[in-house]
Amino acid sequence: MKNRIHCFDADEFANKDAVEIASLIANKEVQSHEVVAATIERAKQVEPHIHAIVTDRFDAALEESKQPQEGFFSGVPLFFKDMVAVQGLSTYYGSEAFANAKPATKSDACVQQFMAQGFVNMGMSSMPEFGFTCSTEFLGSQEDTRNPWNTNYSVGGSSGGAAALVAAGVVPIAHAADGGGSIRIPAACCGLVGLKPSRDRLLYSELIKTQVVKISTDGVLTRSVRDTARFYAEAEKYYQNKKLPPMGLVNTPNQKKLRIGVISVGLKGTQLGSVMAQELQKTMAQLESLGHEVVPIDMPFEDQAMDDFINLWAMSGYVTANLGKLAFGKHYLPKKLTNVTRGLADHYKKSVFKTPFFVSRLKKTSRTYNKMMLESKFDLLLSPTLSHTTPQIGHLAMDLSFEDLFPKVTQWACFTPFANATGAPSISLPMGYDQKNNTPIGMLLWGNLGEDKLLLEVALQIEEAFPWRKITNSIS
């Protein structure tokens, strides 16, 4: 047996990624319960500042960590996003409409796929109501989730709590989910790696299974590419979709020269903020220095695509507002819904007659995108993850009217939804930095359907050549 390191403390834990922690546990250099104890200590240090935990199960996790389940990540702690069913815990979906929610009697399939890897569940992380907006802010008694880099700023959303906990060093990896950018947006805001995998790559939660167009998928937020790569390799051992190319363990950086199309203007002429534009130019130069061909192109989607996506969001808002008791049970309290959900419901009522048309168009986007990528001979596309730098808390406040809030949402998140519509993979990498406000900036790589492996290989290449900035403040 190797010599054990000294007792794991919270600061030491905060600087290690999940693969390293898993290796330390496997080699008996540290025990899982020491890691979990350090997680709890770190959570208690930072939670009063970031407000990212909805429900904790610290005592149960500490007990379970004495004999953790087998798997590559045996004994490694993580949080689940507050939108999946985890046996024994209530799911609130970020909404006061679920204040009376009962504990789940069975975990969703995606949760089982996670837990089969040996993770120790620490609890549930915060999200805005139903993930309908992209900043993790709230009404009522719940505190807004704040960015560990600068707590005056948004953490993004909707997987905001997961991103805050990983960025703050509470856990090295966290469950997240993405229906329009909800993994990649908080990754960009918090300096993390955020992959939205190809459609059907992972098993679904019961909520996602009900979607008319499968725009959502689960995934993870991490601080290193190798953590994301290892998670998908292990997830594939539990379930592999035979219709998609296998990923295996991606542990070798890309060595091929790639042709990369660069998008710098969003739909409806959305222009980049000055800092974002500068960071995009820097990223293009970095990719060229790695030998890739970088080609500026126009946005490959028509403006109608954003309208269709908003209508699909709105349909979800309508179902939630008007049919929620059928879907969620009698404990559901629709009168507690926010302006966001009600506004989406009202928007859908005005466009309900368009439903068969926008659903049909969205279902065709996968073929259209695949054809464009093949005909143009692009291996990947590049854009910023977001149109401008991370806003302050309040810019996307939940007490704004729908008419004021939603145009801000769609303007800021004008690049991420298209990978959800096409089902193709997309990854946000923390390649930029806003010096003035001390907040990270994400750059978005888009792949073709099933090409998750290539995205991770390129991400490894970039991470090796241009290591990203580490968090520069110290929350205590």
Image (cartoon, rainbow, N blue to C red):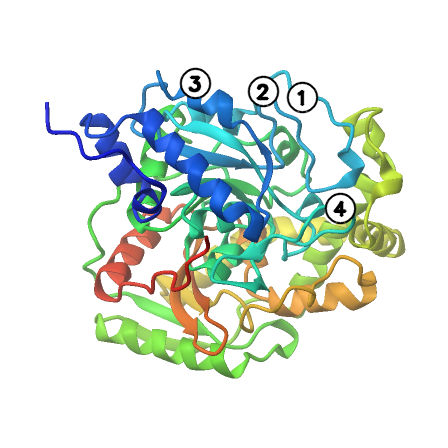
Left or right for 244, reference 17: right
CA distance for labels 3 and 4:
31 Å
Q: Front-most of 457 and 101?
A: 101
Q: Distance between the residues labelled 3 and 2?
A: 17 Å
Evaluate if marks 1 and 2 touch, with contact meaning CB atoms under 8 Å apart.
yes
Q: Is residue 454 left or right of residue 304?
A: left
Rendered position, 43 above or below 325: below
Q: What residue type is labelled 2?
A: Gln
The residue that label 3 is drawn on is 63
Q: Which comes before the other along the chain, label 3 or label 4?
A: 3
Disc 4: which residue: 141
Question: Which label's residue is closer to the chain start, 1 or 2?
Answer: 2
Element assignment for label 2: loop
Q: Position of residue 147 (x, y in %)?
A: 53, 58
Amino acid on which disc 3 is placed: Glu
* Residue designated by label 1: 103
Q: Nearer the viewer, residue 399 or 281?
A: 399
Query: Which numbered disc flags the more N-terminal residue, 4 or 2?
Result: 2
